Image (cartoon, rainbow, N blue to C red):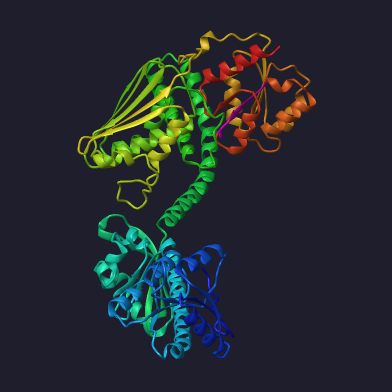
Amino acid sequence: MTRNKTTAKTQFHVALVEDDENIAFLTEKTLSEFHSLFVVESFSSGEEFLEHLDKTPSPCYDSITIDYSLPGINGIELLSALKERFIDAPVIFITHIEQEDLIHQALSSGACDYIIKSKTYLKVLPLTLLKSIEKYRLDQEHLNMSQQIQQFKDYYECILNTLPFAVLGLNQHNSISLANTACQTLFTHEPADLIGRHISDLFEKDFMSKTALLGNLSRVLQSGQPVQLKKIRFNPENRYEHILDLHIFRVLRNNAHELILLFNDITENVLLEQKLFQTEKLASLGKLLTSITHELNNRLSPILGYTQLILGREEDEKKIRWLNHIEESTQNLKSVSDSLLYFSPLATHHHAKKEEDINEIIHNVIALLDYKFKSDNIGIVTKLEKALPLLTIDRKQIIKVLLNILNNSCEAMEGSNGTVTITTQYAESECIITIEDTGCGIPENNIHDVFDPFFTTKQKKHHIGLGLCIAFNIIQQHKGRIQLISEKGKGTKVIIVLPIPATLSSVTSMPAAQQHFSNESSVLIIEDDQFLRDVMKDILEDVCNVDIVADGKEAIKIIGKKDYSVILSDIRMPGMNGQELYHWIKKNHPGLEKKVVFTTGDTYDPDTNKFLDSIENSFLSKPFNIDDLKNMILKACQKSP
């Protein structure tokens, strides 16, 4: 039941429960005549009053007066019934005799005051009612205020505890007076356990010294000027290093100045900044590498081509041995050149996944890391199964995986003269690649975390723990599996399983001797580098007719005048480049564009890859073997009508 709590009321509504009609009449008359302050509603029994309450929607009384001696339920029982109904009004208990136990029972049952029925009863009643009404009003206001204060306190604590920052409050003696729930994560203690501790108990002496924390606290407390400490390092109990921004400011609490310390954990942001910085550095490096490798591949092409041409004609065993050394060195340099581009973020997937020889990829990676392993006195043993079927893979991504794993092996064996064993084998339509080292191994409790991003057991700051995570994702993208087996002090074995396509392709190439060109085959070579033009002409002129031009503009002058079996064009050229020439041919000589094949020294350039992905024409990466060049031209001639 709600009641009107307005303090400026002109009349008060009083319920009188009295079975004596005469006393009820006199009481009602006395109250009604008392400055016209009271409106009285009389009830002859407790049952009648309760029935009225149950039938009346939202009855409102400013006070209730109950006689103890009532027919049916007595005054004490009626008090209990009102309490069960949550009646919101002060109750005056009336009794004939001053019996201490009875009065105590009435007050315990909910009465706010009592009156003895004596000669002065009617004189005392109006003042007692006014006193009880005012007291009840003040009690209600105090209760409402307490509830509002508690709600505000709960709201404040809710906000404080949902903040993503650890917040500490300090009194003037630097003892902790407040701690939110985020403090448990940062300081590894329950917030309640921090209360009362001195701030210096939470930090090591080195941290207190480097941050001049006590001095900064004193400065803020005296001046009121906030202090901010940026990117400070905190390692609680040598578990995990946090990088924090600390804000210190002064507040007024309980009529005294106190300090608030707000710790913002920016560890993840700093790691992301470092990663972004590394990415930007790699982007700059990638631009340089793309340009260098393009020129390097152009220079290697004539060396490799002429070496192989001479080898095919030379009979002197000593000179053949020399030429073999030149060819092998050139091939190794080609592997190193290709591998450099794997670090370039500008390098995009060229034709994404295609058939690749995994053994050849492994040899390329070993060539790249050869000096690193030799300088660290680490041996490399390869057990590669011959005639392994080709895998449909993204060459660049698989090389990333192998580089990450082999670099980890190298670092795990640093200073130990260890050995890395690389094995490939074919089993049940799968290729199994095993890389096993004799390094320090990984503790058992870390095995399940090694593929998680940013997890690393290395102490050097430049390690951010992304290598194996990237490797795991790449292998999954290839619908394969990767497993790591390790024991501390006994080395690590990484097993990579890649699917082999249902239609198996063996690693074969058509020897130059088996190539057959038509006597009428003719090739137009478009290449801006003179040495490359000459070597390609020298390679092909024994098997077909060859014309050469230096750029696309020269080519369009003769295309159409002669029916070429194949047009062999470089992609990057001054003036009209290979892409522009292709589109010109397609527009001006429809169908002839199908006879175009390309050579390029920058197969990882994004624009080049986008172009090659948009067409179905063949291409050859520089530097190339003479047999590969002849095979590509032969296939193109065979397709030519």
Above or below for 331 versus 150? above
Q: Position of residue 232 (x, y in %)?
A: 36, 65
Q: Is the magenta stretch mostly helix, strand or loop?
A: strand
User: Residue 495 versus residue 89: which sits nearer the camera?
Assistant: 89
Indicate the quadrant where residue 467 lies.
Answer: top left
User: Residue at coordinates 43% horizontally, 16% vertically from top-left?
Assistant: 389
Above or below for 532 versus 410? above
Indicate the quadrant where residue 615 lies.
Answer: top right
User: Residue 87 versus residue 498: which sits nearer the camera?
Assistant: 87
Q: Classify the position of the C terminus by image quarter.
A: top right
Above or below for 170 versus 288? below
Q: Residue 597 in magenta?
A: yes
Q: Is residue 550 visible?
A: yes
Number of numbered discs present?
A: 0
Q: Position of residue 634 (x, y in %)?
A: 60, 14
Q: Is residue 157 visible?
A: no
User: Residue at coordinates 53% horizontally, 28% vertically from top-left?
Assistant: 302
Q: Residue furthest left?
A: 489
**Left or right of residue 611: residue 158:** left
Q: Position of residue 530 (x, y in %)?
A: 61, 31
Above or below for 181 versus 413? below
User: Residue 137 versus residue 311: which sits nearer the camera?
Assistant: 137
**Left or right of residue 496: residue 534:** right
- The range drawn in magenta is 596-603
Q: Where is residue 105 in the image (x, y as percent from the top left)?
A: 32, 74
User: Residue at coordinates 52% horizontally, 63% vertically from top-left?
Assistant: 54
Q: Residue 533 in magenta?
A: no
